Image (tube, rainbow, N blue to C red):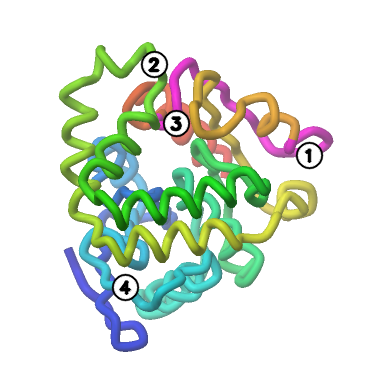
């Protein structure tokens, strides 16, 4: 683990391997540990950067709201510090929202984008209301909120099969400070729609979706790439494809990166 100071805030990141740079961005309630089974495969032929997003993992909070643009600016600062000028971005869930914000702000840095269980769409009014409910819930009972939130990310079929893995994810999630959780929920709630990037972004794009994702409606999110050159890989599990369908995720990412 390495640290970079950004606006008087400690940002935690890792940097391993050599070759084309791949930047891995975790999701809400996650940290760079989520990539631990993915990194060894990718770093054989590539330089792999993981970054703990603001208010997650070992990266400190920057404010009450961590907008996706705030996260993108922080990542740009880290990559500039590392003298990286172009990279393939792989973002899980909230990490995908951040990758798209980065692509909008810093398009010249993008060599390709993978949205893993993520979407270019903004929150619906219903989802915004649910974010507000979540903020109240986590302030009322932090531990119960985190543990329940994690369990609900897996498809119902896998909740019993993957009990050990789910417990491990919960323990990592419980390292996320309350302020980091609230700031991320506020930031996701106000994020803008970036579907236009799937239509006009000049770089290769891949969308990986779980058919039984309890968080993102499969059909709705498949429809966003109609009439685009975005590739789609459909998996059988839920929102945590890197755990529920690990081999298929590794293959999909490997095939995508090879083409670039």
**Dot placed on the residue nearer the N-terminal end, 1 or 2:** 2
Does residue 206 show up?
yes
Tell me the mark number nearer the camera, choosing from 4 and 1: 4
Q: Residues within 10 Å of mark 4 (few under 14, many from 20)?
A: many
- Give the vertical position of 148 relative to 138 (above or below): above
Q: Find residue 156 and name its label.
A: 2
Q: Find residue 150 and name its label.
A: none
Residue 19 included in the magenta stretch of the image:
no
Residue 237 included in the magenta stretch of the image:
yes
The residue at which mark 1 appears reads as 228
Query: Considering the numbered disc 4 on the image, is that residue within a helix, a strand or a loop?
Result: loop
Q: Give the range drawn in magenta.
A: 224-240
Q: Residues within 10 Å of mark 3 (few under 14, many from 20)?
A: many
The residue at which mark 4 appears reads as 61
What residue is rendered at 45% in x and 69% in y?
66
The residues bearing labels 1 and 2 have C-alpha atoms spaced at a distance of 31 Å
Query: Considering the numbered disc 3 on the image, is that residue within a helix, a strand or a loop?
Result: loop
Q: Residues within 10 Å of mark 1 (few under 14, many from 20)?
A: some
Q: Do the residues labelled 3 and 2 touch (CB within 8 Å)?
A: no
- Give the vertical position of 42 relative to 108 (above or below): above
What residue is rendered at 77% in x and 53% in y?
196
Tell me the mark number nearer the camera, choosing from 3 and 1: 3
Q: Which of 24 and 70 is in front in this view?
A: 70
**Dot placed on the residue nearer the N-terminal end, 3 or 2:** 2
Left or right of 100? Residue 166 is left
């Amino acid at each position: 683990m390495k640290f970079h100071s950004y606006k008087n805030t400690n940002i935690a990141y890792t940097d391993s391997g050599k070759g084309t740079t791949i930047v891995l961005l975790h999701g809400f309630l996650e940290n760079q540990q989520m990539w631990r089974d993915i990194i060894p495969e990718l770093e054989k032929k590539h330089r792999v950067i993981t970054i703990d997003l603001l208010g997650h993992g070992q990266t400190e909070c920057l404010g009450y709201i961590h907008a996706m643009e705030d996260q993108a600016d922080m990542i740009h600062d880290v990559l500039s510090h590392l003298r990286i000028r172009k990279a393939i971005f792989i973002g899980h869930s909230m990490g995908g929202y951040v990758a798209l914000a980065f692509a909008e702000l810093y398009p010249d840095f993008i060599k390709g984008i993978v949205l893993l269980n993520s979407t270019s769409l903004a929150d619906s009014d219903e989802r915004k209301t649910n974010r507000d409910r979540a903020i109240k819930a986590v302030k009322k009972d932090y531990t119960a909120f985190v543990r329940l939130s994690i369990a609900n990310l897996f498809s119902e079929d896998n909740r019993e099969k993957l009990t050990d893995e789910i417990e491990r994810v919960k323990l990592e999630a419980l390292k996320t400070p309350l302020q980091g959780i609230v700031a991320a929920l506020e930031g996701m709630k106000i994020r803008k729609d970036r579907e236009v990037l799937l239509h006009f972004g000049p770089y290769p794009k891949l969308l990986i979706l779980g058919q039984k994702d309890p968080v993102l409606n499969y059909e709705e999110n498949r429809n966003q790439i109609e009439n685009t050159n975005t590739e789609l890989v459909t998996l059988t599990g839920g929102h945590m494809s890197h755990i529920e369908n690990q081999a298929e995720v590794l293959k999909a990412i490997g095939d995508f990166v090879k083409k670039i």
